Amino acid sequence: MTDLDQLRPRTIEGVKRLAKQLKRRDGIQYADALDLAAQQAGCADFATARIELA
């Protein structure tokens, strides 16, 4: 586990920042990185995170 894997964003902006870092680190699509970051924030996916963290 790296530091990125232990982060738990609390805002939608934090989810987006983490997604950018995950995209660069893992070489995945930004949309997939958004879903992963949202899951680390405790949400099912990015669409849910936009509602719950707004």
Image (cartoon, rainbow, N blue to C red):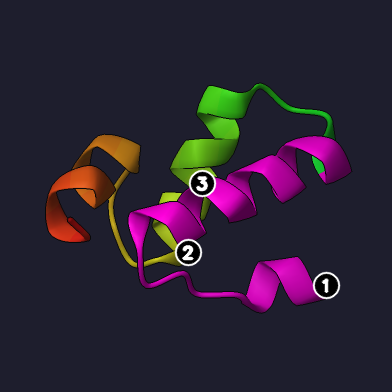
Label 1 crowding class (10 Å Cα cut-off): few <14, some 14-19, many 20+? Answer: few
Viewer-side residue, 10 vs 45: 10
Give the x, y percent position of residue 5: 68, 68
The region drawn magenta spans 1-25
Q: Which mark is residue 16?
A: 3
- Mark 2 sits on what residue? 40
The residue indicated by pointer 1 is 2
Magenta span dominant secondary structure: helix
Of 17 and 38, which appears nearest the observer? Answer: 17
Q: Amino acid at mark 1?
A: Thr
First in residue order: circle 1 vs circle 2: 1
| Quadrant position of the N terminus in the picture | bottom right
Name which quarter of the figure residue 53 lies in.
bottom left
Left or right placement of residue 30 versus residue 12 in this view: right
**In the image, residue 5 lies in the stretch drawn in magenta:** yes
Tags 2 and 3 in contact by the CB under 8 Å rule? no
Q: Position of residue 6 (x, y in %)?
A: 65, 78
Query: Amino acid type of disc 3?
Result: Lys
Question: CA separation, marks 3 and 1?
Answer: 18 Å
Q: Is residue 2 left or right of residue 47?
A: right
Residue 15 drawn at (x, y percent): 47, 54
The residue shown at (46%, 69%) is 9
Q: Residue at x 86, y 45 (%)?
A: 25
**Above-or-below relation of 40 to 36:** below
Please say whether residue 20 is one of the residues in the magenta stretch: yes
Real-space Cα separation, disc 2 to disc 3, in angstroms = 12 Å
Q: Residues within 10 Å of mark 3 (few under 14, many from 20)?
A: some
Labels 3, 1: front one: 3
Above or below residue 20? Residue 10 is below
Q: Earlier in the sequence, mark 2 or mark 3?
A: 3
Look at the image and tell me in which quarter the C terminus lies.
Answer: bottom left
Figure check: 6 above or below 30: below
